Amino acid sequence: MLRLYSVLRRYRPVFSGEAIHWESMFSALIERGVRPVVLSQGQGNLPEKEIVKDVMVRRFWGIGSGMRCEFTWTYELCKYLVATRHDFDVLLLHSCGVFSFLLLLVAKILGKGTVLRMTLLDSDDPVTVSQRKMGGVQNLAFRLADRVVSLSTPLTSRYRQVFGNTRKIRLIPQGVNTARFYPVSPQNKLVLRRKLGLSEGDEFICFVGSIIARKGVDILVDAFLHLADQLPELNLLLVGPLDGSEPGHHAFVQDLQSRIRHAGLTTRVRFLGKVENVPEYLQASDLFVFPSAREGLPSALVEAMAVGLPCIVSHIEGITEDLISQGENGIIVYSARYDDYAKYIQQLFSHPDDATVMGRQARTTVEQGYSVEIIAAKNLSVFREVLVR
């Protein structure tokens, strides 16, 4: 049995796309003989340790705020690695933080395999890290890790810009549980709509993700407002938490809600907040729109494709192109203009047969390259590589 320590700062029940993805990934890895333990950051009244869907979660609290909290949290993790050195074989980090190199250094001194994942372009890639005040120190993590995993082609390119064409880098995108996210028949779609309190005869656009500026929710709302009079049966579902910690988040959400009220469309736009039944909202919808400005590889998009929805997405260089073949299994919008999104939304609702074919192609894309089984096998291969090393 391979024993894995996985450092995920935010994990269930705290909302994060990374946590949702890895909940399914851990289940697939357990079936393949891996015993994962999540090392997470304590929040509020969450217990120090608990079992979450067959995975042990251990939480650690930092002291103070900012850099001090970051360091003390990392220090507590380092102490735990030493104290439980006989209980794990591989250390997996899900992002490159300021003090990640300390965790990797301790693990290597203990003789463990180490893997570092890059998860967000312009956030934890080596080029972006190098530009920060402590970038040289932070980038030590990439040098110390036995393997570096990239979610997308641009992240891989950023790594090679700084460290050259090394053999340490592996491209492994996010996977999706295709047994949980799957297409439903038109009859079952109507059943789901009744269950969720949605009108059976209306049309629904769905967005999944945090309701923040970076995700382009304002662009989507503006596109909807632009189309509302022309498409009176059109509705918008915004699935994701409203209580983010980003600066200006509360004002951003309030502004969106105010504009919707002013347009008299509050009954046609639903802020659903954090929900556990995301697949059902996708399955009950007709179209997925994702205007995000920056991602590593968006889990929400892969999940919508797995459900068989036609998808309209923003152009994120090298990322959306990894997933979408323009006009075949989705549409990439090469601007941040709401009227461009509105044009494609109207186009797909005007040609439902084309939208159906596009959704089927999206599902095929996921089945062939992004199912959780395929991605779990790739991750396990990397873990075994570092064990041998």
Image: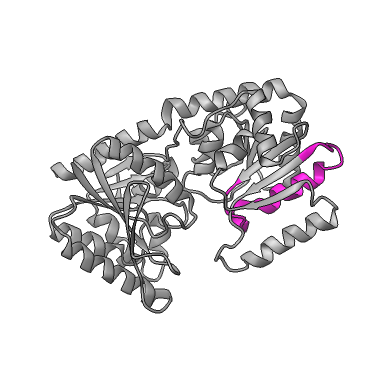
Camera-side residue of 308 and 274 = 274
Magenta-tinted stretch:
208-234
The quarter of the rendered structure image containing the N terminus is: top left
Residue shown at the point (53%, 26%) measured from the top left? 363
Left or right of residue 28, residue 344 in this image: right
Can you give x and y, in whole percent of width and height, for residue 163 in the image?
Answer: 30, 51
Can residue 166 be spotted in the picture?
A: no
**In the figure, residue 213 lies in which quadrant?**
bottom right
> Is 299 positioned to the left or the right of 232 in the image?
left
Residue 193, horizontal then vertical, whole percent:
68, 35
| Magenta span includes 227 | yes
Front residue (pair 128, 43):
43
Residue 255 falls in image quadrant: bottom right
- Residue 214 is covered by the magenta coloring: yes
Quadrant (top left/top right/bottom left/bottom right) for the C terminus:
top left
Give percent across and percent down for residue 26.
34, 43
What residue is shown at x 32% (from left), y 49% (from top)? Answer: 55
| Colouring method of the image | one colour
Task: Please give the name of the residue rendered at 71% of the width and 41% of the height, measured from the top-left corner.
Answer: 197
Position of 22 with respect to 56 (left or right) is right
